[in-house]
């Protein structure tokens, strides 16, 4: 991607009275100047024979960027082999559906530590990632998580990405902020993350980034829930200033409760910088 684009997770809210489909949601977001949507495959894969062609056609017509959030029911560090196999099945079904409409990346949380050591969880997840089917133009993106009890800090995920050509990174800055109880306070805190990614995954990772952003509420245990930016302590201006100064390209997906309003807020701040 030759620029930074902005979009939302799931269907837009509109004025509250509208009920969007993927097709009308894409048209509406495009009319606002937003360029991306993350399809919510979190409980089921809802691209079917009924809507596939229409979604594909509107995506192509508007040159709209589609990704998907994979199933919540993925744990590549499960004790039971059956649960690991189901995780692979769910991700395979999701990425095939996404590819069928011209989408690119499927984002997911790879697993939980449970009672494993961090090293054991890493090895288990690393092995399972190698079992995912490889598609030519589609990738699996591992999302940084919002609690210390969840597998998925930035270091762990960068190490996994190094091991697999079909696996990339999804940086959820809000999760990082919450995981470490409000760590991202000023510009330098965001810059350190881009420095780390560049040093470990190369400059090309900063030219093909996928990001989740929103305000966030947290406790001493980490993430509690997403908030609008203006109701949170998340420093969105310094965050976007770092994107600009590091010449980051790719896609920012807004997960705020006021979806497209905060996506447009981000886009406007970025363009004003």
Image (cartoon, grey):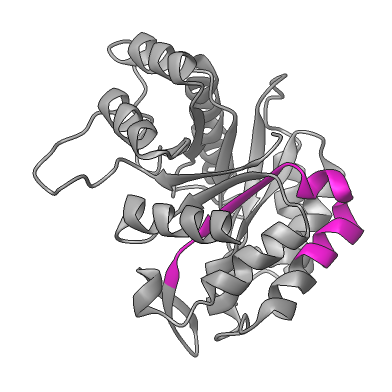
Q: Is residue 186 above or below residue 44?
A: below
Residue 222 as seen in the image, left or right of residue 125: left
Residue in the picture at 87% in, 49% down: 203
Q: Nearer the viewer, residue 21 or 79?
A: 21
**Quadrant placement of the C terminus:** bottom right
Residue in the picture at 21% in, 44% down: 14
Q: Nearer the viewer, residue 200 or 125?
A: 200
Residue 2 as seen in the image, left or right of residue 14: right
Residue 74 seen in render: yes
Q: Nearer the viewer, residue 29 or 66?
A: 29
Residue 11 as seen in the image, left or right of residue 138: left
Q: Is residue 65 above or below residue 205?
A: above
**Residue extending furthest bottom?**
220
Q: Which residues are magenta?
A: 194-215
Q: Position of residue 102 (x, y in %)?
A: 53, 18
**Residue extending furthest front?**
272
Q: Position of residue 142 (x, y in %)?
A: 64, 50
Residue in the picture at 79% in, 47% down: 205
Q: Is residue 10 magenta?
A: no
Q: Is residue 210 magenta?
A: yes
Q: Quadrant of residue 175?
A: bottom right
């Amino acid at each position: 991607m030759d620029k930074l684009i902005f979009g939302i997770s799931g269907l837009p809210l509109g004025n509250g009275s509208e009920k969007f489909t993927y097709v009308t949601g894409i048209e509406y977001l495009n009319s606002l100047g937003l360029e991306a949507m993350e399809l919510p495959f979190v409980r089921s894969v809802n691209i079917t024979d009924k809507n596939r062609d229409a979604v594909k056609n509107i995506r192509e017509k508007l040159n709209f960027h589609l990704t998907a959030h994979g199933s919540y029911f993925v744990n590549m560090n499960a004790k039971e082999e059956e649960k690991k196999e189901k995780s692979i099945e769910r991700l395979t079904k999701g990425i095939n559906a996404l590819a069928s409409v011209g989408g690119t990346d499927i984002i997911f949380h790879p697993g939980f530590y449970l009672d494993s050591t961090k090293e054991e969880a890493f090895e288990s997840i690393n092995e399972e990632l190698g079992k995912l089917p490889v598609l030519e133009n589609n990738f699996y993106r591992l999302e940084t998580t919002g609690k210390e009890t969840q597998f998925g800090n930035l270091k762990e995920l960068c190490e996994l990405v190094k091991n697999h050509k079909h696996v990339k990174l999804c940086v959820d800055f809000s999760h990082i902020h919450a995981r470490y109880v409000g760590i991202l306070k000023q510009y330098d805190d965001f810059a350190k993350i881009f420095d780390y990614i560049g040093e470990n995954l190369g400059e090309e990772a900063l030219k093909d980034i996928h990001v989740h952003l929103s305000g966030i509420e947290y406790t001493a245990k980490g993430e509690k829930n997403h908030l609008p930016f203006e109701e949170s302590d998340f420093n969105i201006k310094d965050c976007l200033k770092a994107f600009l100064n590091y010449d980051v390209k790719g896609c920012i997906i807004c997960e705020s409760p006021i979806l497209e309003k905060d996506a447009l807020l981000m886009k406007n701040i970025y363009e004003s910088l």
